[in-house]
Image (tube, helix red, strand yellow):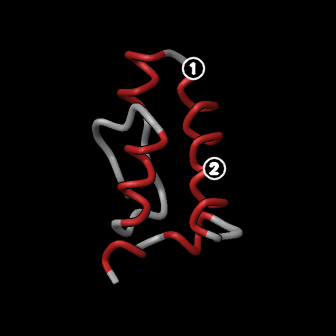
Amino acid sequence: MGVGGIFSAEDAWEKVTAGASLVQIYTGLVYEGPGVAKAIVNGLRERLEVFGFTSLKQAVGTAAR
């Protein structure tokens, strides 16, 4: 689980590729508002396409390999 300091898709992507299969965006919601969730999801979709993944599950832990 990736927690702490997740305000953007880049932050979430870093946690996922490090091995997190779940990210908590509570702090991001507090400081950025509910729109941060949509922005993160859209950004993660873009990264999946760039890296040739069809699901987020495929990206989990790829930086650690």
Residue type (three-letter) at the residue carrying disc 2: Glu
Q: Which residue is mark 2?
A: 46
Give the side of residue 16 with respect to residue 59, left or right. left
Viewport quadrant of the C terminus: bottom left
Give the side of residue 34 with respect to residue 5, left or right. right
Q: Quadrant of residue 19?
A: bottom left
- Label placed on residue 44: none
Sequence-wise first label, 2 or 1: 1
Dot 1: within a 10 Å radius of its alpha carbon, few (fewer than 14), some, or many (20 or more) residues?
few
Looking at the picture, does residue 15 appear above or below residue 54?
Answer: above
Locate residue 6, reporting x and y percent.
Answer: 37, 37
For image coordinates 42% across by 44% down, the residue present is 10
Looking at the picture, does residue 23 appear above or below residue 1?
Answer: above
SS assignment at label 1: loop
- Marks 2 and 1 sit apart, C-alpha to C-alpha, by 20 Å
Considering depth in this image, is 4 or 52 the residue closer to the camera?
52
Considering depth in this image, is 50 or 53 the residue closer to the camera?
50
SS assignment at label 2: helix
For image coordinates 57% across by 20% down, the residue present is 34
Looking at the picture, does residue 23 appear above or below residue 33?
Answer: below
Give the side of residue 40 with respect to residue 13, left or right. right
For image coordinates 62% across by 42% down, the residue present is 41
Dot 2: within a 10 Å radius of its alpha carbon, few (fewer than 14), some, or many (20 or more) residues?
few
Viewport quadrant of the N terminus: bottom left
Q: Which residue is mark 1?
A: 34
Mark in the foreground, 2 or 1: 2
Residue type (three-letter) at the residue carrying disc 1: Pro
